[in-house]
Amino acid sequence: MSPLLSIEGLTKRYGRTVALDEVDLEIRPNEVVGLIGQNGAGKSTLLKLLAGVQQPDSGRLVMRGSPIKVRNPAHAAEQGIGMVFQEQSLVPNLTVAENIFLGRPNPGTAGGVYKWRRLNALAREQLEKTGSEISPSALVQRLSFADRQMVELTKVLALEERTDGDLLILFDEPTSVLSAAEIETLFAQIRRLKRRASIVFVSHRMDEVLAISDRIYVMRDGRRVAERDAAACDENELYSLMVGENRAEDYFLDADRKPYDRSATALEVEGLTAEGSFSDVTFSVCPGQIVGVAGVIGSGREALCRALFGALPTAAGRVRLRGEEVTMASPRDGVRLGVGYLPAERKHEGMVAERSISENLVLASTPALTRAGLLSWARESDLVEGWIERLGVKAPSARVKISQLSGGNQQKVVLAKWLALPHLRVLVLDHPTRGLDLKAKTDVYKHVRAAAARGVAIVLLSDTLEELLGLSDEIVVMRDGRVTGHFPDVPDTPPSSEELVKLMV
Amino acid sequence: MTLNDTITPDGEHVPAVRVPHARRMSRLLPGRIDQLAPVIMLVVLTAAFSMLNDQFMTADNWRTIANQAAIPMVLAVGLTFVILTGSIDLSAEGVMASTSICVSLMLANSLNSNDLGLVAVAGGIAIGAVFGLVNGLLYTRLRLPSLIVTLGTWFIGLGIASYVFPDQQPVVRDRSFRSWALGEWFGVSRLVTIAVLVVVAGAVLLRYTRIGRHVYGIGGAEDLMRLAGIRVDTYKTLAFVIAGALAGLAGLMATAQLGVGNANAGADRLFPALSAVVLGGTHLAGGRGGVLQSVLGVLVLVVLGNGMILSGVGPYVQQAVVGAVIIVAVVATGWGARDRLRVVK
């Protein structure tokens, strides 16, 4: 069968870095192509070139037999290429209908004048394709996440009336923030779409890619390294192709797991409630213990993390640190009491991007470095060098901006910021490996294990159940702001993923 | 951004993952309380002043209020467009000064033999539009902050006015132009009618045209608008042109009122208009608010000033009260969106 789109020798450089190196791919009509690779493998770059967000340095695209150029996303749309962006591309303060037809000529407007009734009717027609009952005149910002994903999809589907041929729809990690149920809905849509479109599906999660794809391309270091039929390969094979080596036997470093002190408690949470986020949450963490919190978006677990650090006000309940009741009115209290919080949004909340490694690392521990209000550079430098070495941060010097490091090294610095706190007792890790590649993940695991061995109590949130099961000593499950399950001994009697998911949704 | 410090309701930092944030916001903003705040304030002020003073609730006084509100309204409508895109335009006073001097010299006046009539009026609006165009182009092409660009053109406007200014003040002799301020339509000065027409046009533009909707979209998520292939820079520039043209019109209105070309025609006009926009509930971060809200903001400020004068409040106290009202209004508007970790600049 002749391909819908051939990608020939596509190359993209950013400065000296080659993001895409002479990549050849083929997308056939009515198939789902899975695209996997570690961070920096070039998947997102490839999609951006196809969707016209960026321009290639060399190489060409051949669509339905004739070479095409894609100048910008609107131009891509005209040629039947649509992309569902990883971070949704809906404008929050415009209506659903406006978003569906954003940037395209449509019969709902004439000469720059909006005919709202007509526009809404057209949008309704499009929304019906996904069987959704979202109001076209609703503001996007007032929709739930799942509804927004539907609008995003509808927006892409609205392309079909505009082109005669098949569509090409690109999904850039659409599932990373969806719940299991929402993923199923999305998959059902993708299967339906196959009749009319070819789909490129990018994800970090092997199981998903295997489940939905017909064919899988593996990318590594900007190159296409393998092509497989989904039916004829398994997760392990894909992992090793992605990494270029086999995944370590003891991936979650079980050997480093130390017995923890069960007689003491580092953190006790009793009936903790934060309005609109979670209510009546009770659990405790021993020194050196890792307690994982499972839950989907909206379960309130992220809010719980913030509350434990003093970043979110609570309405009721108690928090005790080493048996002593504490009130945390702000993150400042959290730091003072020895609670560290590694936020999920590293770039925005975890680090000060425009400052140096050194400044970022000592952010929480400046009191220990000052004498009479003056910062001691010598002490700072000792501390920083020490941690850079212990955590193996790869950087030319401690004076370079943290934003110049790779994601994994940035995360090590953020982690070190808390580990350097002399009185650290509790470390709250909100998705500590989000967006990191395998090697960097393993490094984070190592340091989390080391912190636990030091007696730090750890509360862990994770993107995957696999990671949560692999690292935790104990798992607490949350749904709609309440604790729905509790597995006290994960290493010896681990719950199954199905068991956890049932409690989560 | 010291200018924004005092008046911003929401120096909102836009997070990369806008989802959880947006969700939190929508949950914390029950109904439309942020939009109701100026209405409530207007009702409360009106009720309070009518009780305090017999003269307040009279047709004459409301006529005065309408007359006083006319020029700030025209300015506020223009500013709303720019602020909705997330930018700021400080140049209004400079634009008004330039227009006032230039137009008074083009109309029949005491200093030269010009008598260009409507052409002069169109010229005044065009001068404003050109200022707006320059603002927009400098801002979008050179990628300078709009705050700096328009601060610059503010003073350039004042400079042009002083440079063009002849040895003595030109007195406007064009009767029909003067009748804008002296004549009446529907029992109020014609300036009020002009202001109302501007408000209606602004509201329609925002609600029913591509320019208006794109202005909202740009304020909401500029990067996404760009990704959708929308010429963001063009629309931003258009917003500045609208603001500039309306500042030009405001300059004409002030000239009609004063009867002379005056380099101080715009003096102390910017901050009341800016405050009114913010009071009305338009976010300085862009994307939220509208022309009608700004009108409410203007009315709150004018009613407050008028009521205090009638009640014999001293001018210094008046200023302090206005300041306090602005802060209270902004706090009330932004109350729902508080968050311990929210960055406000």
Image: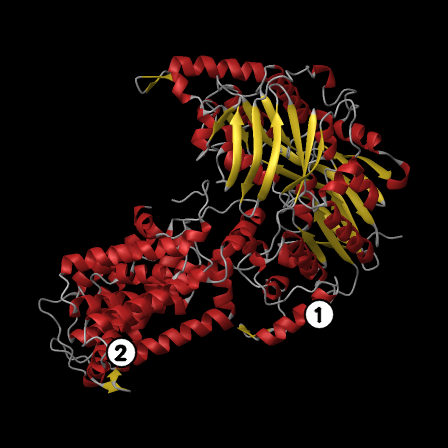
Residue B110 against residue A313 in the figure, above or below: below
Seen in the image, is B340 located left or right of residue B197? Answer: right
Looking at the rendering, in which quadrant would you find the C terminus of chain A? top right
Residue that appears at 41% across and 49% down: B11
Q: Amino acid at mark 2?
A: Leu
Badge count: 2
Residue B175 percent location from the top left of the image: 18, 85
Q: CA distance from mark 1 to mark 2?
A: 47 Å
Q: Do we see residue B200 in this rendering? A: yes
- Residue at image location 81% in from the left, 60% down from the top: A196
The quarter of the displayed image where residue A195 is located: bottom right
Image location (x, y in percent) of residue B293? 39, 66
Q: Residue furthest left?
A: B168
Q: Which residue is mark 1?
A: A125
Q: Secondary structure at mark 1?
A: helix
Answer whether residue B102 is visible to the viewer in this image: no
Q: Are marks 1 and 2 on the same chain?
A: no
Residue underneath mark 2: B191
Tag 1 subunit: A
Q: Please give the chain letter of the residue carrying mark 2.
A: B
Q: Amino acid at mark 1?
A: Glu
- Foreground residue among A110 and A224: A110
Mark 2: secondary structure: helix
- Around disc 2, counting alpha carbons within 10 Å, would you say few (fewer than 14), some (14 to 19), or many (20 or more)? many
- Position of residue A360 relative to residue B87, above or below, is above
